[in-house]
Each structure stands twice: as structure tokens, then as C-alpha cells.
Image (cartoon, helix red, strand yellow):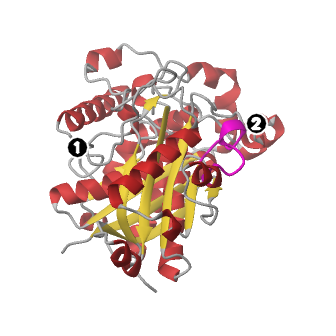
Amino acid sequence: MTDALVLDYVRTPRGKGTAKGSLHGHTAVDLVVHLQQALVERTGLRPDTVDDITLGCATQVDEQGADIARTAALLAGWGDDVPGATINRFCASGVDAVGQTAARVRAGDLRLAVAGGVESVSRVPMFADRGPLYCDPPTTRRIGAVLMGISADLNATVEGFSREELDAYGLETQLKAAAAWSAGAFERSVVPLPATAERGGLDHDELVRPSTTLESLAALSPAFAEAGAAGQDEIALGVWKGIDHIDHLHTIGTSPQVADAAALLLIGSPEAAEAAGLTPRARIVGAASTAVNPVVMLTAGQSAVEQVIARAGLSPDDIDVFEFAEAFSALCLRFRRDLGAGPDRMNPNGGTMAMGHAFGATGAILVGSCVEELERRGGRYGVAAVSGAAGLGVAVLVERVTA
């Protein structure tokens, strides 16, 4: 066995996941190719030394179909000999791509590889693949597959979180994100997309709302009450027997915002790092994939964190940085309470509720952000995790490499 090392990390800015978003003119493949070219320019990487590319993508249809990892490798001019694979574990796809790639490096199957994720929600909307999990009513009812917002409100009800507590977390992440951008926290990793005559450009996460206040959040209406009344609550309560009603408390201000983005990590063995002349930034210690009840689904990311920490013989107190995908405020409050992860350690620069959730890309962004924050604060261990649809969760544990 050998070490799997993070050698570099790049990402695009996150654009609004609508037709009005600044990245709407760019396909998912465009975003990945842009980052592949940036990796070559930044590191002097020789593409012919890359053994494989693995990308996460949650909605693999139309422009995001037909193995876009391989398509991007060809369009980026990386040559005929660089393979590629695109995987789907819903919102946890990107972090899973990183975990799987690291495992293959540790096993000696790969020497140097690229892992990451991409999603253009503005061009390929959620549910566009028409999968049976959400689009076949008999399957949906049998499994108990509900909208994530219904699951979030279910979790808030079960845990007893108040609307005020949810709103307070929503404000916190917005203010953290605004402060991080003002401080230049993402300058090393974000690769701007220049504007052209045909397409818009972007150099920042355009979903951040620094003017957010508790008053503005309190004025928002519950986002999922209507869906609940239309039958979603009935499905959820038919599976989850612990309560007799769901309090609909989450709003658009305490829910993740959909975004367009891509992220790539260059991962290799010590020998590959030396051959490429690159200084390792972190070691990928391990990964964990978990699953929970599909109705309560959003707790899976936390269970993956607990599992990967325990497997490494560590405790939550040993972790300097937690990057946890903000799948609604209630799950963040639960995570913080159960793991003792205060605001200084959990999402210290804001999260997906403020900066955007680009499904397949989010997990890779979180791993890279974790490495960067460990470098800033001189920490040792960090964990990145995402909860996905159908009760899936994936976490990756990293250790900063010191000279």
C-alpha cells in the first residue's frame, strides 16, 4: 500500500443554477475542460502521465450523458490514451469520486489521477434523467422517496429545532461566505471563466447574499409546505412512524441553492508526485460510504463522517476542519450538536446554503476547501462529507502534509 496524496485542487466559481446564471452559457464539459487546462498551466502536468479521470455527476443525461469524463479528456487535448469514468451517487458523487480514486492510488492501480465532479443544473435540471426513484409513483411510494426539503423538515421536527434556530444558521453561513470572499480565501483554487462575445464570465460565487439579516430570513415563507400537503407528508409519515405530523420550517434561506460548477483534484502516489515535481498538500487517509432510511435520508453524511473518523482510530475532537454539505439548516445543527463541531471548525468559510450546491461537484469542492483551510490554520485532520438522495452519504478524511 502507498499513500494517496492531493497534489493540487482547482474549481470554477459557482454560478446560479438558472437560465439567468452567469455560467448558463457553458456546458458541463466546458467547465471540466477549463479546469483541465488550468491544471496543466498551474502545475506543468503532462496529461500523458494521468492514468485515469473520474468525475461525479448526478444527472447523467443529454449534455451530461455519455461519460463526460472521457469526452472532456478528449476535448481538452489530453490525448487518446487518458481514460475517464463518470459516476453517480447523487449529491455525494464528487466526494465519492475522490474517495474511489484515492483507494485505487493506495492499492497501486493508479499512479497519478484526476478526480472531481461537475454539474450544470441550469442546463440539465434536477430529475431530467427521469429516474424511477422520483418519477415512477409506485417506486416512490414503495421506497418512501420524498423531496429533500420534506426530509429536512422531517428532521427538524424529529430533532425539535425551531424556525429561529434554522434561520440563525442560515444567517451564519451567509456571513461566513461573504467574509471568506472578502478575505481572498478562495483565490488559490478558483479559476475564473472570462466573458466572451457568446458566453458570460464569472470570477466569484454569485449566490452569496452578504446583505442577509435575521429579519429578511424571518420574512420568508416555508418552502415545502405545499408539497407536503400535496402528498409528500403522507408518504414520509407512512414510512417514518415516530411522529404524526411534519412542521414545515425550512425556507429558501435555509436550504441549499442550486448552482453550476466543476472541481478537480490531482491525486497521486509519492513517486508520482516526485516525478511530476509537485509538493503534496494533503494525504487522503480514507473514505466511508453509508446509507440510512430514504425518508430521513439527510443524516447519511453525518453517519459517513462518524464512520471514517472511527476507522482511522480518531475522535471528532481530533478533527480541525469539518466541511459538511449544507443540506438544509436542521442537518447542520444536528451535526454540530452530535459531533461538538462549533462554528470555528464546521464550514468556517460558509457552505452550500450560501455559495451554492452543484450536485456532482459539491463533494470535490468540499475536499479541496478542507485541504485549503487546514493549510491556512496549520491543522492536521479534516473531513469532507455530503448527504445524497435515497439516504446515501460519503465522507473523505484528509491529513495535511507538513514538510
Which residue occupies the foreground of this view, 2 or 305? 2
Label 1 neighbour load within 10 Å: few <14, some 14-19, many 20+: some
Identify the magenta region: 57-69
Quarter of the image with the C terminus in it: bottom left
User: Is 52 positioned to the left or the right of 340 in the image?
Assistant: right
Residue 255 at x, y percent in the picture = 45, 31
Mark number, residue 130 = 2
Inspect the image, locate mark 1, and give the three-letter code of the amino acid beneath it. Ala
Which residue occupies the foreground of this view, 210 or 16? 16
Where on the picture, by quarter, is residue 211? Answer: top left
Mark number, residue 44 = none
Asked if the stretch drawn in magenta spans residue 355, the answer is no
Up/down of 262 relative to 211, above or below: below
Inspect the image, locate mark 2, and give the three-letter code of the amino acid beneath it. Arg
User: Is 100 positioned to the left or the right of 395 in the image?
Assistant: right
Residue at the far bottom in the pictured view? 1
Principal secondary structure, stretch drawn in magenta = loop
Residue 253 visible somewhere in the drawing? yes
Residue 340 visible somewhere in the drawing? no
- Closer to the camera: disc 1 or disc 2? 1
The answer to whether the residues at label 1 and label 2 have Cβ atoms under 8 Å apart is no
Residue 44 at x, y percent in the picture = 36, 61
* SS for dot 2: loop
Q: Which residue is mark 1?
A: 185
Residue at the far right in the pictured view? 138
The residue at 50%/41% (across/down) is 31
Q: Earlier in the sequence, mark 1 or mark 2?
A: 2
Up/down of 223 relative to 288, above or below: above
